[in-house]
Image (tube, helix red, strand yellow):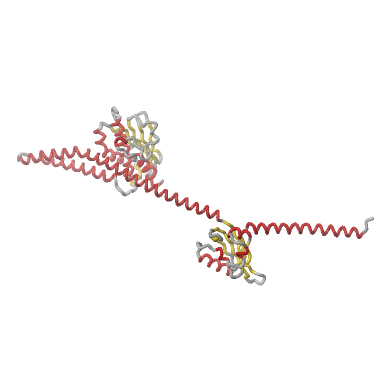
Amino acid sequence: MLRLSDIKQMRSENITQSDDYPLMDKTDEIKRLLDTFDKYIIASKTNVNGIITYVSRAFEDASGYSREELIGKPHNIVRHQDMPKEIFDGMWKTIQSRNTWSGEIKNRTKDGNFYWIKTTVSPDIDSKNNIVGYKEVCENITSAKAYEELSKTLENRVLQEIIKNNEKTAYMLHQSRLAQMGEMISMIAHQWRQPLASISAISGTLSLDVMMHNYKEEFFQERLNAIGELSQYLSQTINDFRNFFKKDKIVEKANVKDIIESCLHVIDLSLKSKNIDVIIIIDEDIVLESYVNELKQVILNILKNAGDALLEKSTQKATIWLSSYQKESKVYILIEDNAGGVPDEIIDKIFDPYFSTKEAKDGAGLGLYMSKTIIKEHCKGKLEVHNSERGAKFIIELPLNILEC
């Protein structure tokens, strides 16, 4: 028979068991949390003088020092020489003012290596409101800093490569200009030959008349006027040459028709001497704002290449078509010849640097490469080539106003 005393004893045991088990579970959980904290969180405590009184296992692992080597030592035992003294002065000023300090610090390991931490340091205040020490909790950010440093290094390397490429492009542009100047001097010499011959013939006739004391004033004046006109023509070719190779790169407003006619003025006699006709179909009202002189260099280079191709292939009724039109905010300049086109196997290479089909004629292989660079990088446009039914067709696409790009 169950007695009352037995029931009380059982109730007492049940109460003890039901209360003890949750308490034991909570204690174990706290121990596990503390163990996790100790293992993974870099933490330390010091007294008011900065002498270490506690370190976590994670602190030991990061620094390479054992707990015994750290306790009782100044916290600056892990200070890295790269860290400015001013940072620690600011930290001490902050925490001694009962405030919390946060920042990134590079620490030194026992073997002379380093690790980075993102740390928070705060004063340890007792029940009497006195500072009895300082607490530090840190996050190891060495990997993040390494990635940051790598990013900076890569960024610097990319920047250096860009600078090198810009220098290389500038050098190649200089080479291209020298080559083009040589070609233009040849064209100018060709243009000058006939006017100089005429001046020589006129002056010879006038000198003979003077020697014979047999000349008419009206005829004499006409011949002098002719010499003046021919001299102006020679002077204009020099101005054209100088304008093409001005060093100052400025944005100008110009009529497309005037730009093309300026190019033809330089190369026209050279093309005529090769029996090459030029057909112009241009909207006279198109005005653009761009780097006009550089655009002229490109047009002149394409015209020169077209003339060379027509001469090389001995094309019957050799012709170059020049056309231009405007579509919305874009201007298109088309230069087409009837030399049969660019072979399919090289058409994708003709804009490559140093690629040339004129090796036997000492072609520099920079003209079209620099032409595309000028149009793309400087004039903010496009330069393409396609084969038409007649031959090669170069298409220059330009913004109507480069300043709005």
Q: Is residue 40 left or right of residue 241?
A: right
Q: Is residue 201 left or right of residue 36?
A: left
Q: Is residue 22 left or right of residue 367?
A: right
Residue 218 visible in the current orientation: no
Q: Residue at x 41, y 48 (%)?
A: 162
- Give the vertical position of 69 relative to 260 (above or below): below
Residue 143 placement (x, y as % from top left): 55, 53
Asked where in the image residue 255 lies, by quadrant, the reply is: top left
Residue 235 placement (x, y as % from top left): 21, 44
Which residue is at the front of the view, 368 or 359? 359
Residue 393 placement (x, y as % from top left): 36, 33
Which residue is at the front of the view, 310 or 50? 50
Which residue is at the front of the view, 65 or 222? 65
Asked where in the image residue 323 lies, by quadrant, the reply is: top left
- Give the vertical position of 365 relative to 93 (above or below): above
Which residue is at the front of the view, 206 or 24? 24
Q: In the current view of this chain or complex, which residue is farthest to the left?
A: 213
Residue 145 visible in the current orientation: yes
Residue 188 placement (x, y as % from top left): 23, 40
Q: Looking at the image, how many numbered discs can be counted on the residues? A: 0
- Give the vertical position of 71 relative to 205 (above or below): below
Q: In the current view of this chain or complex, which residue is farthest to the right?
A: 1
Asked where in the image residue 328 lies, by quadrant, the reply is: top left
Question: Where, quadrant-wise, is the N terminus in this rendering?
Answer: bottom right
Q: Is residue 13 left or right of residue 258?
A: right
